[in-house]
């Protein structure tokens, strides 16, 4: 109970809807300072976005190739544009880039600004330029994307209004950071020819399972309304450390998000109301399979609540870590300031982790027992295997397309392939349903009662 209201009551859902209406829709390629909070704005890829990038950088050729079980993207040139956010106003350009864009070291960012690669309102500026809300920032980059799992995307359901897929782990829903072509939206457009999809909800990059897209504005509005009114039941399956308590466990601790190049969600008294219901399904003597039911939809909500309860997801590299202290953040005990925590996270998760040393052996980054077990698990998960198209000659590596740009940071600092444990997490979106439809996947093999590898 919260303030005398049941989680599933109409009054409770209506209050949530009113409080969150202004956040109901996100904007792609729009000025955040000009958004009308009462106007429904569709969160979708612009119709010409993919074609413009493809014509500019990849021609009409396949942007992907398969290597060592990974889907990789040939490097390409890309013009990035962003509007000045309100939190950037009256701050120096170099400070903004170095604090919020973790792709490059500060020295490299300084070189990019001073050389005019980064522009403000189409003009070169100096490092100390003070940003204004009306500013438009642009930069040209020779883009290198991180690999994702080489897996075909299974369609669960499709009609004239909806496309529902079983998203493989490691693939982000939409472009972000070092992922663009290697996002679900772009892969579906490139390989499935589904264009102009509207992003209805999100899954973490490492989370697999049910992902719903709308094909038109009307369907997008209707489903967004369902989400905002809490009319949709969302059930996830995860495997956590230790023996989870019996019975139904409710966690209604508020969650606040903190950002400094990387983002982390923590239980915090000034956070947003967040409610998750947990129930243990099985225990194999080492870890527990837990069903999670979301009543709110905060970023990293399940992961943050499980960390707080003391049962983090088995291989969650962010929340199942001693970087939070000896108790891994249980009951909110971090043993350091938030600023120190963020700095430590940035140091550990920075892009330098991905840069390969010249003398590094290819397999040095994934020789742990955990990685070996995950390799076997991914092999056994036939639902995320490659189809005939991915095995065809069209996806064979073409060395002539690996163009080297001497001015590109990542051409001279090669990206390291991710470890198997950075391609998968024991968290799966199993079922989404409302009174009009229900979509679900098969249970993951790692959620079976007799699975005891980890």
Image (cartoon, rainbow, N blue to C red):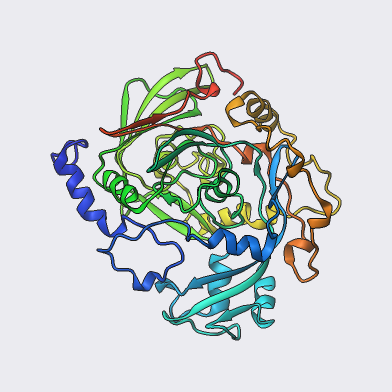
Q: What x and y, as percent, mark residue 432?
A: 36, 34
Q: Residue at x 43, y 78 (%)?
A: 89
* Residue 322 lies in quadrant: top right
The residue at 54%/71% (across/down) is 81
Q: Nearer the viewer, residue 171 or 447?
A: 171
Q: Quadrant of residue 387?
A: top right
The quarter of the image holding the N terminus is top left
Residue 139 placement, left or right of 393: left
Nearest to the observer: residue 334 or residue 434? 434
Q: Residue at x 61, y 25 (%)?
A: 382
Q: Is residue 34 left or right of residue 284?
A: left
Residue most toward the top? 450
Indicate whether 339 appears above or below 265.
below
Would residue 104 be visible to someone looking at this image? Answer: no
Left or right, 61 with respect to 136, comes to right
Above or below — where is 149 with respect to 224? above
| Residue 137 position in % (x across, y down) | 53, 76
The answer to whether residue 267 is visible is yes
Whole-percent x, y for residue 362 in the image: 81, 43
Identified at 31% across, 25% down, the residue is 248
């Amino acid at each position: 109970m919260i303030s005398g209201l049941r989680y599933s009551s109409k009054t409770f859902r209506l209050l949530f809807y009113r409080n969150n209406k202004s956040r109901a829709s996100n904007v792609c390629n729009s000025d955040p300072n000009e958004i009308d909070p009462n106007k429904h704005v569709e969160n979708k890829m612009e119709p010409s976005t993919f074609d413009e990038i493809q014509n500019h950088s990849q021609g009409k050729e396949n942007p992907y190739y398969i290597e060592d079980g990974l889907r990789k993207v040939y490097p390409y040139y890309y013009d990035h544009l962003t509007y000045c956010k309100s939190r950037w106003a009256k701050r120096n350009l170099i400070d903004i880039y170095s604090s919020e864009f973790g792709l490059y070291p500060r020295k490299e960012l300084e070189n990019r600004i001073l050389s005019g690669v980064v522009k403000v309102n189409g003009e070169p500026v100096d490092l100390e330029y003070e940003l204004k809300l009306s500013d438009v920032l642009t930069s040209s980059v020779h883009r290198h994307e991180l690999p994702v799992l080489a897996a075909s995307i299974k369609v669960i359901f499709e009609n004239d209004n909806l496309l529902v897929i079983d998203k493989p782990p490691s693939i982000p829903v939409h472009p972000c950071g070092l992922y663009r072509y290697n996002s679900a939206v772009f892969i579906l457009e490139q390989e499935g020819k589904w264009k102009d999809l509207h992003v209805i909800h999100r899954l973490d990059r490492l989370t697999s399972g049910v992902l719903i897209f709308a094909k038109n504005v009307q369907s997008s509005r209707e489903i967004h309304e369902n989400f905002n009114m809490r009319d949709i039941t969302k059930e996830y399956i995860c495997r956590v450390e230790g023996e989870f308590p019996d019975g139904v466990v409710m966690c209604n601790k508020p969650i606040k998000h903190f950002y400094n190049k990387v983002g982390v969600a923590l239980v915090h008294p000034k956070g947003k109301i967040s409610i998750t219901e947990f129930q243990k399904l099985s225990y194999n003597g080492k870890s527990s399979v837990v069903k999670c039911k979301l009543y709110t939809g905060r970023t990293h909500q399940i992961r943050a609540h499980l960390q707080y309860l003391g049962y983090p997801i088995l291989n969650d590299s962010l929340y199942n870590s001693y970087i939070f202290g000896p108790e891994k953040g249980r009951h909110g005990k971090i043993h350091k300031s938030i600023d120190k925590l963020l700095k430590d996270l940035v140091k550990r998760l920075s892009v330098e982790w991905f840069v390969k040393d010249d003398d590094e052996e290819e397999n040095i980054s994934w020789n742990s027992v955990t990685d070996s077990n995950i390799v076997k698990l991914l092999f056994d998960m036939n639902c995320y295997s490659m189809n005939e198209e991915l095995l065809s000659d069209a996806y064979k590596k073409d060395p002539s397309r690996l163009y080297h740009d001497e001015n590109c940071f990542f051409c001279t600092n090669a990206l390291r392939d991710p470890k198997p444990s950075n391609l998968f997490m024991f968290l799966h979106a199993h079922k989404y349903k409302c009174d009009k439809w229900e979509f679900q996947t098969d249970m993951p093999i790692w959620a079976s009662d007799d699975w005891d590898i980890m």
